Image (cartoon, grey):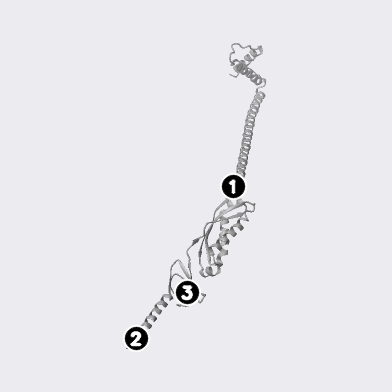
């Protein structure tokens, strides 16, 4: 065999072998778990390669885009917004997203980060513009949920899933903050005055209730004394009816004796002037008592 022919045929086989090896290398694509590859054939979208081993047509198919499907965080954004009560607020937002359809992301939007940031800023201004400042401060969770839902609906056509959209802070300028502090102090003073007035009112009500209770108890006591007095009078009247005038004289004499006894018990009473009628009363009382004994 001619050596030149052998060398020429060997070169051909080597070239064919190299071509086959290169073709196999281009046909086999190993995609990492965190990525997806967008494959084009002659400039048109052919397929999207998922994680693992994939096969393509060498020299016709090419990997045009390598897209990470890991969750990403946009830089913290700051934007101004005006509430319905004309208060300028500065809103700080944070957005997390991930790519779920790489073919939409690479062919429908050029700068996805900038597009999402612009969309979030517009939605934040729109949502805050529907609320008053107090609502923005008190309904932070509801506001965040509304913004998240609107952002998700807007970026769905880009093959993006917004996993989190949070409002980190809502701040005010110095003049507005000072005015709010004055309003807050005035509200605190008003509440203190209302509380004090309510306390005084309650005290008056309790005092009135106490006086009413005392009056009721006094009336009950007078009623009991009156009933007792009426009962005593009824007993005396019955005795007079049964025993005649002697019972009445006995009661009169007994009252006179009790009155003199009370006068004699006073402090510094060494001498008591007793009327003649009193002595007669003593005598009558003793006689009646003696008669009863």
Q: Are marks 1 and 3 in contact (CB under 8 Å)?
A: no
Toward the viewer: 112 or 217? 112
How crowded pointer 3 is (Cα within 10 Å; few <14, some 14-19, many 20+) is rated as many
Q: CA distance from mark 1 to mark 3?
A: 57 Å
Residue 110 image-quadrant placement: bottom right
Please name the residue shown 47% across and 76% down the image: 61
Q: Who comes first in sequence, dot 3 or dot 2?
A: 2
How crowded pointer 2 is (Cα within 10 Å; few <14, some 14-19, many 20+) is rated as few
Rendered location of residue 79, percent (x, y):
58, 56
Rendered location of residue 156, percent (x, y):
55, 66
Q: Who comes first in sequence, dot 1 or dot 3?
A: 3
* Helix, strand or loop status at disc 1: helix
How crowded pointer 1 is (Cα within 10 Å; few <14, some 14-19, many 20+) is rated as few
The residue indicated by pointer 1 is 174
* Helix, strand or loop status at disc 2: helix
Which quarter of the image is occupied by the C terminus? Answer: top right
Rendered location of residue 98, percent (x, y):
50, 64
The residue indicated by pointer 3 is 62
Residue 54 horizontal side relative to residue 214, left or right:
left
- Which mark, by number, is residue 4? 2
Foreground tag (3 vs 2): 2
* Helix, strand or loop status at disc 3: strand
């Amino acid at each position: 065999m001619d050596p030149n022919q052998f060398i020429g045929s060997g070169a051909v086989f080597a070239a064919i072998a190299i071509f086959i090896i290169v073709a196999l290398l281009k046909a086999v694509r190993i995609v990492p778990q965190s990525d997806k590859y967008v494959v084009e054939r002659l400039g048109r979208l052919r397929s999207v390669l998922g994680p693992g081993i994939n096969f393509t047509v060498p020299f016709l198919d090419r990997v045009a885009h390598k897209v990470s499907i890991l969750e990403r965080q946009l830089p913290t954004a700051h934007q101004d917004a005006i509430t319905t009560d004309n208060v300028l607020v500065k809103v700080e937002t944070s957005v997390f997203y991930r790519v779920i359809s790489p073919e939409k992301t690479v062919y429908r939007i050029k700068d996805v980060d900038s597009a999402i940031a612009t969309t979030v800023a517009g939605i934040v201004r729109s949502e805050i513009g529907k609320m008053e400042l107090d609502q923005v401060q008190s309904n932070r969770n509801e506001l965040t949920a509304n913004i998240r839902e609107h952002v998700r609906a807007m970026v769905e056509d880009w093959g993006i899933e917004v996993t989190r959209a949070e409002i980190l802070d809502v701040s005010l300028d110095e003049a507005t903050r000072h005015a709010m502090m004055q309003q807050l102090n005035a509200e605190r003073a008003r509440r203190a005055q209302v509380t004090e007035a309510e306390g005084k009112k309650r005290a008056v009500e309790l005092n009135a209730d106490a006086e009413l209770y005392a009056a009721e108890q006094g009336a009950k006591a007078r009623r009991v004394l009156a009933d007792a007095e009426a009962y005593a009078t009824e007993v005396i009247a019955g005795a007079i009816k049964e025993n005649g005038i002697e019972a009445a004289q006995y009661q009169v004499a007994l009252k006179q004796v009790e009155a003199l006894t009370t006068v004699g018990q006073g402090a510094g009473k060494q001498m008591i002037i007793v009327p003649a009628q009193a002595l007669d009363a003593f005598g009558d009382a003793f006689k009646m008592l003696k008669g009863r004994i």
